[in-house]
């Protein structure tokens, strides 16, 4: 279970204190999916960055599967990111000097997986996301939708327990956006991973098991879509 308690984040800006998140609390069951929506500046990306350890909160607590994510040592945090956390960004962040296959296998190589095993696993994941034919191509040689699918494969190749996706369909046309969303939902179901997705598509968020609306750094609406 992902449990967030009284989470707040403040920034110093031009001599004033700006509150990006204020007293946010929620619980998300293991394997569930949460869509986070809200206007620009509502605190969506800040929330995702705090959950992923990219930023530290000003106050509050984050626990995942009974582990306090804010009290981990640097070594424990690095291990958590490497083994249990998958991050999918709005901009695919693929390395241009490496092939699609090499980009996808990168997390396994960093984790110490032998190259041949990493390559075989990456090829399986490229097939899962429907772009096995792009393995030897470089990012600039494939379409935007294919780049994002490669980023999803890279984010999930180590079978994480928690997947954080920041506007994963934001730069795609409607057709590709639908395909990528359905792909994420299918993989979320197949992996049994907990998914938190920031999206500007309210209809996507409503199709996940839970939907949160943020406004001015606070939860303005929480809906459970389970039937």
Image: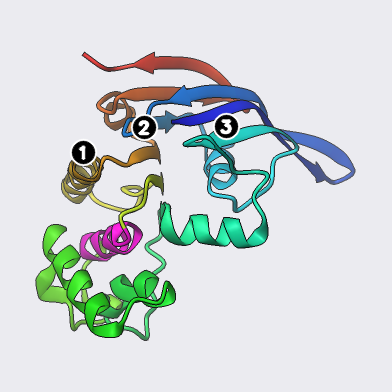
Query: x%, y% of residue 4?
Result: 57, 29
Q: Is residue 13 left or right of residue 146?
A: right
| Pointer 2 with pointer 3, Cβ within 8 A | no
> Does residue 146 show up magenta in the picture?
yes
| Pointer 1 with pointer 3, Cβ within 8 A | no
Q: Which label lies toward us, 1 or 3?
A: 1
Q: Circle 2 is placed at which residue position?
A: 30
Tell me if I can see residue 170 in this picture: yes
Whole-angstrom CA distance, mark 1 to mark 3, is: 28 Å
Q: Is 199 drawn above or below residue 177 in the view shown?
A: above
Query: x%, y% of residue 51?
Result: 54, 42
Local crowd size for mark 1, using a 10 Å CA cut-off: few (<14), some (14–19), many (≥20): some
Q: Circle 1 is placed at which residue position?
A: 189
Q: Residue at horizontal 17%, vertical 42%?
A: 186
- Pointer 2 or 3: first along the chain: 2
Q: Which residue extends farthest right?
A: 15
Q: Is 47 drawn above or below residue 183 in the view shown?
A: above
Q: Residue at horizontal 69%, vertical 46%?
A: 56
Q: Is residue 104 left or right of residue 68?
A: left
Q: Is residue 61 left or right of residue 91?
A: right
Give the magenta range.
145-158
Q: Circle 3 is placed at which residue position?
A: 42
Q: Quadrant of the N terminus?
A: top left
Query: x%, y% of residue 33?
Result: 33, 32
Q: Is 160 drawn above or below residue 222 in the view shown?
A: below
Q: Which label lies toward us, 2 or 3?
A: 2
């Amino acid at each position: 279970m992902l449990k967030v308690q009284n989470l707040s984040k403040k920034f110093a800006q031009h001599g004033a204190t700006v509150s990006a998140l204020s007293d946010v609390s929620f619980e998300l069951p293991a394997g569930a999916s949460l869509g986070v929506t809200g206007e620009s500046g509502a605190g969506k990306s800040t929330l995702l960055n705090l959950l992923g350890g990219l930023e530290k909160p000003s106050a509050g607590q984050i626990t995942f599967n009974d582990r306090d994510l804010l009290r981990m040592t640097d070594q424990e945090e690095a291990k958590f990111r490497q083994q249990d956390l998958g991050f999918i960004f709005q901009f695919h962040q693929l390395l241009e000097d490496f092939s699609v296959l090499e980009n996808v296998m990168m997390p396994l190589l960093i984790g110490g997986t032998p190259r041949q095993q990493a390559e075989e696993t990456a090829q399986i994941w490229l097939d899962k996301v429907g772009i096995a034919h792009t393995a030897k191509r470089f990012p600039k040689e494939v379409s935007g939708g294919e780049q994002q699918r490669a980023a999803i494969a890279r984010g999930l190749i180590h079978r994480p327990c928690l997947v954080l996706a920041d506007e994963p369909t934001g730069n795609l046309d409607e057709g590709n956006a639908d395909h990528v969303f359905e792909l994420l939902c299918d993989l979320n179901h197949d992996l049994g991973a907990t998914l938190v997705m920031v999206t500007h598509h309210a209809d996507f968020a409503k199709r996940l098991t839970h939907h949160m609306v943020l406004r001015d750094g606070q939860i303005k609406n929480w809906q459970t879509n389970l039937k």
